Image: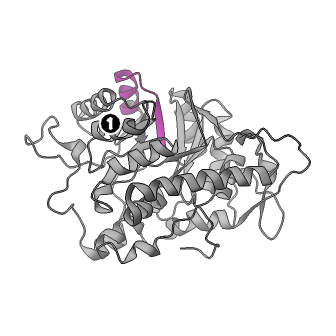
Amino acid sequence: MTGRETGPAHHPAQPVHNQLPQQHYDFFAGGAGEETALQENEDAFGRLALLPRVLRGGGDRSTAVSVLGREWPAPLFVSPTAFHRLAHPDGEAATARAAAAAGVPLVTGMAATTAVADVVAAAREKDDDAVVWFQLYLQPEPEVTTELVRRAERAGCSALVVTVDSPVFGRRTRDLRNGFHDLPPGLATENMRNLPGGEPGRPRSITMWPAGWDDLRRLREQTDLPLVLKGVLHPEDARTAVEQGIDALLVSNHGGRQLDAAPAAVEALPAVAEAVAGRVPVLMDGGVRRGSDIATALALGARAVGVGRPVLWALADLGEEGVRGCLTALRADFDHVLALCGGHRPQDLTADQVVERGTARRPTRGERTC
């Protein structure tokens, strides 16, 4: 946790700390190594301030944004996280229903404890047009990747979010200390059941391996779904991705769970946005806890931002109702901040409104904000 004040949309971990077994709490809360990248995701926002604009007139404010051909009610989505049934018995189904009811798109994870078809069905219980994307790790066996893609297509997912920052598993200190390596009996990574080469009825393990651009090109040939590349921090990778026909980028350091030496996502965002130069949407996740964080990320070049851990804490605390409340509060908080910044639309937020706290100096492109 940081020293920043807890705002109305901030769901800290503390209320659920005693509700979850220690190893499960640590799985959600922890990061890689010394957890520097994990902490920096939040702290980097705390080092930035917003310069409001005044006397802009008009009261017709809207928080809607367009992403991959769909209008979202707000520049907010639920980032992919694993094992929701460790937080609550209803797991990803509760998260999906809550997100759909709040009008917030959901990225369901490949390592979910609820199969993608059931996640989409749960979302559509609340909204027939609910946006659900599927997060994918490319697997070394092409036939496994293909089958996962087909399942996402059949379920009704409208995009694939390909996580590319995991050539190996991150060394997550808390999990190593707790000996947490697998789900407890009765829970499984349901998307990994009955895949080619696996034992019938049993889930395969998810393999982390160093995939390349050729593997991504093969994926592009296999599906018409838009591809979102998640885990991009270097501007040269962003340029290459656009040249390779990627439909959107998601700037992310994996919630601080992979490379502990990586910068905060919001620090990497401006250089990636500059490299992309508006050719595809740029999304971001990592450390977003309140409406001002959303506004800051948008001003620095993001089209929309994702939240992960706040959703998990809300799920563990109050289930579906908690997640809906968390997301609704974040939307309302962003709308309030947008008004205070003199904006009528999310695109009204501009980079010259972001300054380093204590200096009123604008961070330059690609410069760390410390």
Of residues 2 and 39, the one nearer the viewer is 2
Q: Which residue is mark 1?
A: 121
Image spot of residue 172 (x, y percent): 36, 67
| Residue found at x 32% / y 72% | 20
Figure quadrant of residue 96: top left
Q: Position of residue 111 (x, y in %)?
A: 30, 49
Residue at image point 28% right, 74% down: 21
Is residue 32 in view? no
Q: Amino acid at mark 1?
A: Ala
Name the spot of residue 332 as percent of width and height, x first: 64, 52
| Vertical side of 325 occupied by 116: above or below | above
Which residues make up the magenta segment?
215-231
Residue under the image location 54 percent in, 29 percent down = 68
Front-lying residue, 14 or 194: 14
Which residue occupies the extreme right position in the image?
Answer: 55
Q: Position of residue 176 (x, y in %)?
A: 29, 72
What residue is at 51 percent from the left and 46 percent from the top? 102
Label 1 sits on a secondary structure element that is helix
- Mark 1 Cα-neighbour bin, 10 Å: few <14, some 14–19, many ≥20: some
